[in-house]
Amino acid sequence: MLDLVIIGGSAAGSAAAIYASRRNLNFKIVTTDLGGEVALSGEVGNWLGIESIQGFELSQNFQKHVKSYGTEIDEGFKVEKIIQKDNYHIVTAKNATKEVKKYETKSVIIATGIHPRHLEIPGEKELDRKGITYCTVCDGPLFRNKITTTIGAGNSALESALMMSRIAKKVFVITKYDNIKENNGGFPRGENILIDKIKAMDNVEIIYNAKTTEILGNGMVSSLKYENIKTGNKKEITTQGVMVHIGSNPNSDFVENVKKDPGKQFVIDQKCRTNIPGIFAAGDVTNIPYKQIGIAAGQGITSALSAIGYINKWK
């Protein structure tokens, strides 16, 4: 019987693991990969104590810290279900070769994060990985000296466009918002320092009030169509790469008995407790209003301390 199973290996799961290790808990991390969305981030400039660091490097630092305690990690395993039995839980996970592992544990921390949201428009499915990417950090260098288009209005879209401005010949940015003060210059969820940088780039063209309607190409992306939300005018632009950054969905479908909000995020209290005793959740997979690495790490710590308190009283 384990004390704890931590599901997920990014900021929240790593922070929880460090605190669990320091309390000498008998626990394991079960995760499909280490790093999660942090490893796919571009430049991170808001991690306390470090002025600037690449997301991949930051995730490597997380892993190094966690592993320094000798933490047991079952990487490559995707949790399929959690079943409550009496006063403990059975966690079932499977890897790509169909190997199944089951863990009996007193408590669980779900820190599975999020995955990119899709546009759900014609051509997206057919041209996925053929010029369409949801990870600019991963695939951006493939489009050197080409024309690319970033779709989105948040920080991830701004970071994508900023990265591509240094790689691509021309960068379009499509936002559905108007270029007015009330919309933060077309990027209501973006940080002003990133917005100012993008607007100062000579090879970046921002298309406002636009909704992408179709992505075209014969085997590879060659253009996309968009519609002006206000006027209804439709246009087509040439592009060889499309970077989609329109938000994310929580990785929560594998759990059925834990309460979720309408967006399928786990509902938690101030101590990261769910409605099921012994099951805690932390980070972007929860109904926390802000999705930030620092906040996810803080929630990971909170969930670990709450789990420790629960384990101490477990009978």
Image: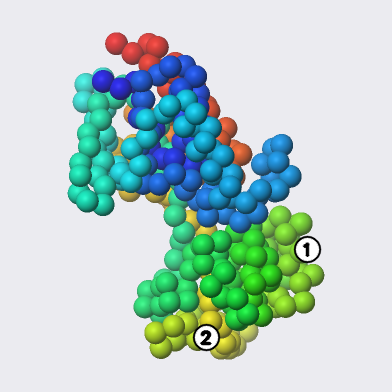
Neighbour tally class for label 1: few under 14, some 14-19, many 20 plus, Cα within 10 Å = few
**Residue displayed at 29% across by 11% down:** 315
Residue 64, percent from left and from top = 52, 36
Tell me the distance, in whole angstroms, between the alpha carbons under discs 1 and 2: 27 Å
Q: Is residue 172 above or below residue 64?
A: below
Q: Is residue 157 above or below residue 66?
A: below
Residue for badge 2: 223
Query: Is 136 in front, or is 263?
Result: 136
| Number of dots carrying numbers | 2
Hey, which quadrant is residue 34 in on the image?
A: top left
**Residue displayed at 38% across by 16% down:** 311
Label 2 sits on a secondary structure element that is: strand
Residue 45, percent from left and from top = 70, 48
Disc marking residue 196: 1
**Residue displayed at 44% across by 83% down:** 220
Three-letter code for the amino acid on which mark 2 is drawn = Ser
Let me know if residue 267 appears in the view: no
Neighbour tally class for label 2: few under 14, some 14-19, many 20 plus, Cα within 10 Å = some
Query: Is 210 in front, or is 4?
Result: 4
Residue 46 relative to residue 303: left or right: right
**Residue displayed at 59% across by 44% down:** 58
Let me know if residue 42 appears in the view: yes
Label 1 sits on a secondary structure element that is: helix
